[in-house]
Image (cartoon, grey):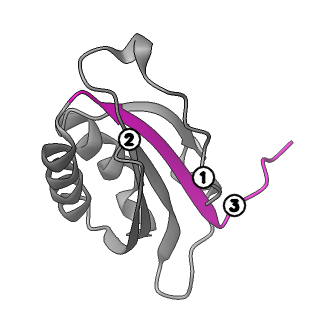
Amino acid sequence: MNKPATRLFQVQTHTRLARVDAIDATRTALASAGASVTDIRHYSNKSSVFQLLLPAQAWDELRHALTRASLCIDAIAPASSDELVQDSDGDVCGTLQLLYTGEDRESRDEIPAVPG
């Protein structure tokens, strides 16, 4: 059975980098993957959500760029680019949620996922 295609993607990450450094690293990673940031929302200095446009062919590059930027991927959906539906320009849209965990990941406050 074929999986249904999705128009949106969601990526949840965390990092121990300082907030400002994490945002800079994320922006650099997104730019290197060819993503365009359409909006950023900050929540209580513990989380930021980036709304993105990404060329569909850059899906795998996005995953690698985030890992190179010291961002740990907690959840990613869909799992492969085959499940993404492109718009007329070949882009897909979605969100990246970035949690700032500091040095102690175990004591962080739980922040629920933000709808994409």
* Residue shown at the point (42%, 68%) measured from the top left: 52
Residue 95 is tagged as none
Q: Mark 1 touching mark 2, by CB under 8 A?
A: no
Alpha-carbon distance for marks 2 and 3? 28 Å
Range of residues picked out in magenta:
1-16
Q: In this view, does 60 lie to the left or right of 64?
A: right
Alpha-carbon distance for marks 3 and 1? 17 Å
Q: Where is residue 114 in the image (x, y as percent from the top left)?
A: 60, 52
**Dot 3 or dot 1, earlier in sequence:** 3
Q: Is residue 23 magenta?
A: no
Q: Where is residue 23 in the image (x, y as percent from the top left)?
A: 22, 52
* Residue shown at the point (81%, 47%) measured from the top left: 2
CA neighbours of label 3 inside 10 A, class few (<14), some (14 to 19), many (20+) = some
Q: Mark 3 touching mark 1, by CB under 8 A?
A: no
According to the image, label 1 marks what residue? 114
According to the image, label 2 marks what residue? 46
**Dot 2 or dot 3, earlier in sequence:** 3
Alpha-carbon distance for marks 1 and 2? 13 Å
Task: Give the number of the mark in front: 3 or 1.
Answer: 1
Q: Position of residue 16 (x, y in %)?
A: 24, 27
Residue 6 is tagged as 3
